[in-house]
Amino acid sequence: MTDMRAEGRAAMSDGNRRRIDDELGTAARGALATRGVTKRYGSIVAVDGVDLDLPAGSFFSLLGPSGCGKTTLLRIIAGLEQPDGGTIHVDGLDITRQPPERRPFNMVFQRYALFPHLSVFDNVVFGLTTAGSERPPKAEARRRVGDMLTLVGLDGYERRWPSQLSGGQQQRVAVARALIRHPRVLLLDEPMSALDRNVRHQVREELLRIHSELGTTFLLVTHDQDEALSISGTVGLMNNGRLEQVANPEGLYRHPATLFAARFIGAGTFLDVAVGARSPGIAEVDLGGIRFGAEDTGLTGDRATVLLRPEEVKVTDPGAGRIDGRIVTCAFFGSYYELTASTACGTFRLRDTHLRAPGEAIAVTWPETAGIAYVPSAAASAATDDIAPLGASEA
Amino acid sequence: MSRRRGIPWLAFTCVALILFLYAPLAVATIYAFNSGTRLVWPPEGVSLRWFGHVFGDELFRNAFATSMTAAVATAVVSSSIGTVAAIVFTRRSTKLARLVEALGRLPVMLPPLFVGIGFVALMKATSLAPSMLTIVAGHTIVVIPFVILVVTARLRTYEVEVEQAARDLGATPLQVIGRITLPIIAPAVFGAFLVAFAFSFDELLITNFTSGTQSTVPIYVLGRLRRLVDPGANAVAVILLLIPWIAFGVGQVVLKRFTGSGLSDALLQQGR
């Protein structure tokens, strides 16, 4: 990944890069903050008092299930929706009441929203010709369009029409069109949801390269945790209009703060346990007589739900593990197999390097201290099949 | 294959339908190019004498000029008002906008006779004299709903995000309309313009009430047929038939030249 990024950077001429740096001259700008942003649609609260903090130059992802309010929040930041409450600040300046054309942001729309009646050149140059823009002389505008198309790897596409481009190419044009105005923050609304899987991978690399090249703040909205975890420096997990947790990808995967975060990010086994002795940070838990220590997230009461990540759970021979069971499914994922095993204490989700036949008798085991214990939610109790989708997310 | 041969009714229906639809057109056209003076079958020869005869008639030339002026004016007025209305209706969803949209569509269901009588009453009440103004007003009332329909359909088929993207790139609301909305819907607006033109050109019922002493081509042909039935009336009918077709053809060429997509694309697929 790092190699490809370096390669991409090398592909851009030094002169080119210097020029873009000069024009920006703003690598330190682009700090975005929201305070108590709220949006209601009738009785539904779409965004509920969100406080975001994006340092200048960061790559931040808003992640969450559909309907969690992430796109609404992005549109409020872009100025396409008005919040019912709260303020938006960029570099300390309150821009809550400014119309979209006067905000120092530009957006890459989910379905690109290229102007169908304009060529690639006219699409990209559009942002330099509007009332709210700097309107540089023609020659300079042409040069900047060229620079932008070079940046996104579409040299020589100036005279094509949007309808002649593939999805990935349209997306690059949308990125170039948004970046030509040197926004302090680039807003990306599900930019990869309309792309094929392999194109998506390529676009992810491109976005990372462009981000490191320009140093612009990127704010990306996505429902795809793989995308959010692999691309961003910081992830804000949203649920029901609220920010559930803000952390770096690894922190979010290894230490989900809430049960929702634990269920949404990655895969895992969820066990309903009794809580025993509690020492600082670690709770002694009891799974039908099997005792082990789990990370304590502020338990109350005597029941808890414990998350075990697949990589914490190991398969051994029957009788040699903590609990005996049988293989239910075995799915191939290239470098590993993802197994589900049913036991007396529920279904376990785990990884192994060997193919195992369904029905095979095994035992599962995990370390003395493993997993994270949460206050059980009212809706989901008992070790459950209600787990994140198979094969989802490796951070 | 055998199954297809098994439905002679289908073939019969098709032939009957086509004959029924196009036989009068064919007969009128053939007689228009007839060289004889009487409408007898078979026609006596081929000539353009009746077209010359018609265009030599000053009454016809005046009627033609009146019709042309009325049709162009109707097309300009109705496509301008209709386009503005369509943009407002699709971009604002207040109760008032919806009410006005419904009211704007109503004239489609009004009998032209009613509109005509209404105009007579209105002119009496306001002592407004029948003139070009009243002709155009009468046509515009009936044709505006069509314009709104066609333009609204186009406005609803492309993504509103395109306009939001323009705002995001610094365009003011007015610039969005001028540089994004209008160019995208231009083929539909032009199509509506031509529909309005064609409608106005051969409108007879309302015009009868609103034109006063002025004669339009349909009124001229009706008056002529009252006096005598000769191939000249057929020549006028063919002219009435050709004018909208020529307008459509010109529109197709112009649009292909300027937008890369023809009028038929705009009217038929209404989308991207």
Image: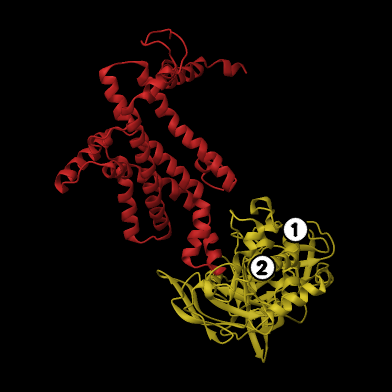
Chain colours: A yellow, B red
- Crowding at label 1, few (<14), some or many (≥20) Cα neighbours within 10 Å? few
Residue A243 placement (x, y as % from top left) = 56, 78
Q: Nearer the viewer, residue A92 or B54?
A: B54
Query: Which is more N-terminal, label 1 or label 2?
Result: 2
Residue A22 placement (x, y as % from top left) = 72, 80
Q: Nearer the viewer, residue B191 or A265?
A: B191
- Crowding at label 2, few (<14), some or many (≥20) Cα neighbours within 10 Å? some
Q: Nearer the viewer, residue A145 or A189?
A: A145
Q: Residue at x 41, y 53 (%)?
A: B86
Query: Which residue position is annotated with label 1?
Result: A156
What's the residue type where badge 2 is placed? Ala
A77 left or right, relative to B206: right
Q: Nearer the viewer, residue A164 or A295?
A: A164
Residue B192 lies in quadrant: top left
Q: Which mark is residue A141?
A: 2
What's the residue type where badge 1 is placed? Gly
Describe the element under mark 2 as helix, strand or loop: helix
Q: CA distance from mark 2 to mark 1?
A: 16 Å
Q: Which mark is residue B151?
A: none
Q: Is residue B25 visible to the viewer in this orientation of the structure?
A: yes
Describe the element under mark 1 as helix, strand or loop: loop
Q: Residue at x 49, y 55 (%)?
A: B182
Q: Nearer the viewer, mark 2 or mark 1?
A: 2
Q: Residue at x 50, y 41 (%)?
A: B267
Residue A244 placement (x, y as % from top left) = 58, 78
Q: Is residue A290 visible to the viewer in this orientation of the structure?
A: no
Residue A294 lies in quadrant: bottom right
Q: Quadrant of the N terminus of chain B?
A: top right
